[in-house]
Image (tube, rainbow, N blue to C red):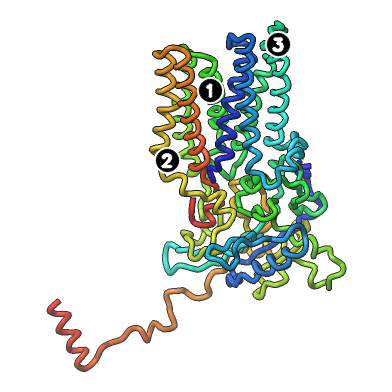
Amino acid sequence: MNPAPSVIVFTVLSGLGFGYLAMLGFGLVPVAGWGAFFAWGLGYGLAVAGLVASTFHLGNPQRALLAFTQWRTSWLSREGWASVLTLLLLAPQALSDWLGLGWWRGFGCIGAVMAFVTVGCTAMIYTQIRAVPRWNHWIVPVQFLWAALTGGLVLAGAGLVPAMASALLALVLVIGWRIGDGRFAAVGASMETATGLGAIGTVSVFEQPHTGGNYLMREMIHVVGRKHAERLRQIALLSVGLVPAAALVFLPAPLAVSLAAVSHLVGMAAARWLFFAEAEHVVGLYYGKR
Amino acid sequence: MTALPQSTEKKLGLVIDLDTCVGCHACVTACKGWNDQGYGVPLSDQNPYGADPSGTFLNRVHSYSVQPEEGFAQTINFPRSCLHCEDAPCVTVCPTGASYKRAEDGIVLVNEDACIGCGLCSWACPYGAREMDAAAGVMKKCTLCVDRIYNETLPEEDREPACVRTCPTGARHFGDFADPESKVSKLSAERGGYALMPEMGTKPVNRYLPPRKKDRPQEASLLAPLLDIKAGGFAGWLDRVLGKIG
């Protein structure tokens, strides 16, 4: 699949933003006054920036509000509702923390749970697609949710917990790649099943249906992005796992958190690039490509 | 609504005969021609006369080489378009309700006025039946020529999809698969019509007819006796001598 910058920015930033908002909602970050204002501002900023980025790849963004209508069937629509509800539910908590009103944390806790529901909905947009075997597996929501939780913990402060979460995220990524690498074969789609000509013999492309490119090839048969897959996997593992974990344990708090957060962002961007670039759509089979 | 209908009264679709298709691309052209001027926004082209032309099409014709375990490879032309699936994943993923499957005849359509161009339906389709129009930013797909098949201003013989109407070899057939007595149902049953990628769980309506068995073994070329040349005279002597030396 095409690793479009808009979807990578969207999933990385909103994942981190909602993860951090959840930490703030649960009251796990000791902030008050202007500190709280900036902390909540960062959470809202990341989440909203991600959501705004997601509209950049729309062909007709002026009709985006219609996307709230089909929540009964569509994960994309559910994600829209979940994200708006989360941002609204957390607003009283943010206000209370900033102005020191000391309100009951009910809204914060429900909003925090909704933040993870939102990330889960984002993951399901991809997981539901059977035509992309690598995505069509429960490990995808696990990866998205764990990445959001880790991001939130890293931003929330230094210590052993975010360090361990970061190390575990690296493990979750490795498990995801191991599972993902075998998914296409496990589903059993091939040029023979795609064309139904397997009963006659082995199918190969004799001639392509068109000499130029088309939407399908640009969007779903994007092979260029996989070229440096191995190197990117190493970068992702170092950046989301080792660097933040080491920084959070050994460095003084403010430096540790900023270094770990930046490293986490870089690593997640690499991991998400691979999430799209390595995902092979079965339509490629018609073109003799993966 | 992007919920799929429980069942549809009719199941309109195509039978594509891979035995008769000669890969002339007339259906591709007819489809593009008709859908350039009727239903929805036109199918645009980008840089059509330049170095890197590209465009939106609802029907593409692939050509495959199929190698049996024994004997020569076979060339099979393979038109690919929307299969109007009963369990269409492209419909349920749509966040706006633009994608829908009609309860009356099972045709899968896009309401372009509600399409935000997110592209998710094209991801959900295993068959590459949907292409985003680069000019209009909305999703285009086969409508089964919904503006022809019910169009009473057209002569009756023209009330079928443009691809079917134009096919010079009669490799495409249009009809109702819900009726076991329809032409397409019988043809599919008779010739072993099959669905594409059943493992995707989409329950396509369209059926493909496999190529018929060749009526004579491919090894027995008509030219075989002429190819078995025995050299005589000087060439024959040379052949024998060189054979011994070698």
Q: Nearer the viewer, residue B213 or A204?
A: A204
Name the residue type under label 2: Ala
CA gap, disc 1 to disc 2?
23 Å
- Could you tell me residue A81's position as x and y percent? 72, 30
Q: Residue at x 48, y 44 (%)?
A: A185
For discs 3 and 1, the disc positioned in front in the rendered view: 3
Q: Nearer the viewer, residue B108 or A76?
A: A76
Q: Around disc 3, counting alpha carbons within 10 Å, would you say few (fewer than 14), some (14 to 19), or many (20 or more)?
A: many
CA gap, disc 3 to disc 2?
46 Å
- Could you tell me residue A113's position as x and y percent? 66, 19
Q: Around disc 2, counting alpha carbons within 10 Å, would you say few (fewer than 14), some (14 to 19), or many (20 or more)?
A: some
Name the residue type under label 1: Gly
The image quadrant of residue B224 is bottom left
Above or below, A38 relative to B226? above
The mark that comes first in sequence, 1 or 2, is: 1
- Quadrant into which the N terminus of chain B falls: top right
Q: Nearer the viewer, residue A38 or B125?
A: A38
Q: Which residue is mark 3?
A: A96
Q: Nearer the viewer, residue A32 or A188?
A: A32
Q: In this image, A57 relative to B40: left or right?
A: left
| Mark number displayed over residue A151 | 1
Q: Are marks 1 and 2 on the same chain?
A: yes
Q: Which residue is mark 2?
A: A229
For discs 1 and 2, the disc positioned in front in the rendered view: 1
Kindly identify which chain the residue marked by label 2 belongs to.
Answer: A
Numbered circles on residues, count: 3
Name the residue type under label 3: Ser
Instruction: For mark 1, give the secondary structure.
Output: helix
Q: Residue at x 71, y 46 (%)?
A: A60
Residue A3 visible in this rendered orientation of the protein: yes
Q: Around disc 1, counting alpha carbons within 10 Å, would you say few (fewer than 14), some (14 to 19), or many (20 or more)?
A: many
Q: Are marks 3 and 2 on the same chain?
A: yes
